[in-house]
Image: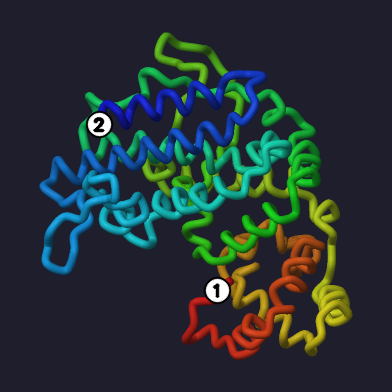
Amino acid sequence: MLQAAKNEARLAVDLYNRQGNERQLEAFLVHMAMAWLKLMQAHTQRTGGDLFIRDKSGRRVRHEDGDWRYKASNQLLKEHFADNDARKVNIEFFTGLRNRVEHRHENNIAALVAGRTQAHLLNFERTLVEWFGADEALASELRFPLFVSSITQDAVAAVKRVRSHVPVAVLEWIQDFDATIEPSIAEDQAFDFRIYLIPHKGPKTEADAAMTYVNAGDLTDEQNAVVDQVRTIIREKQVPVADLGNLRPAQVVTKVAEAIARPFTMHMHTQSWRFFKARPPSGAADKAATRADFCRWNPAFEQYVYTEAWVSFLVRKLSDEATYDAVAAYDPSTSSGGA
């Protein structure tokens, strides 16, 4: 069962990386779903767990065709991963997305979720090693893929063009999913794998590789401070506020108030960004820790600005009576927010 899981992962990567093939993302997700299922089944079996669905008396239940009924993937997920484990949330994201992929837009959707796709595979490798040891790892068989468009100067513009071609229903589903998870999970590399490529300058030694992975947890406080500075430079350079709509809160209030039936005031806007966690609370140490699709911190003017996507999101969500009431009644001291 373990080897079958690894074979499914190998096939998923092979199909995804083949150029010119149609339905690459769908093939990857289908085979990775099988890989994860078989990996969890192998781990359950190895640790003495129960793979079968049982009735109230504890007896195994059969399908109509006579075969035993096995636990589904979502049930095994709950047994093996905590709710706040970013690996579990990443799997749940792709389980939902798989049913929403439109084939003629698949390449654009794949580009939009590339970081999460990479995390999906890395999580499988990490879990495989945790459960069965380094001897079973796939790392020696897989290579870091080359994406030219991801490292050119116009990468941000390219990503924006991709987003414009993704079906609205898919974008809205991704927005809704993201709004349900905690910022700490959204920022976790196990949910969405994001990297900064910094050219290595200086003499090359025999020990140097073309690419070296550095775990932030292995860095000193001083080294992490430098990395944070680099992140800030890249973030401000690649995602200029002007490109994101540059809407002040008052402009957001005007637009949303005109589009929904119930009142939308500045107080309601504050309730909204708190409820949907679009930005950190006032006085937060890291003001730039926002949901980038919705809000950005402008350090030059020391204020938050919002996007047209945030306006569209609010109009769609607050048009629902129950959601509007939940946002209006939200108490940040006792509540955890929602979607």
On the picture, is 150 further left or further right than 54? right
Mark 2 or 1: the one toward you = 2
Q: Nearer the viewer, residue 18 or 299?
A: 18
Mark before the other along the chain sequence, 2 or 1: 2
- Asked which quadrant contains residue 20, the reply is top right
Q: Residue under circle 2? A: 2
Left or right relative to 160: residue 32: left
Q: Tell me the residue that label 1 is attached to.
A: 338
The quarter in which the N terminus is drawn is top left
Q: How is the image coloured?
A: rainbow
- Badge 1 amino acid: Gly
Please state which amino acid type lies under the numbered disc 2: Leu
Mark 2 burial class by Cα count in 10 Å: few <14, some 14-19, many 20+? some
Q: In this view, does 232 lie above or below 290?
A: above
Query: Residue visible at 27% across and 34% down?
Result: 129
Horizontal and vertical percent position of residue 227? 54, 43
Kindly identify the residue that appears in the image at 25 percent across and 42 percent down. Answer: 41
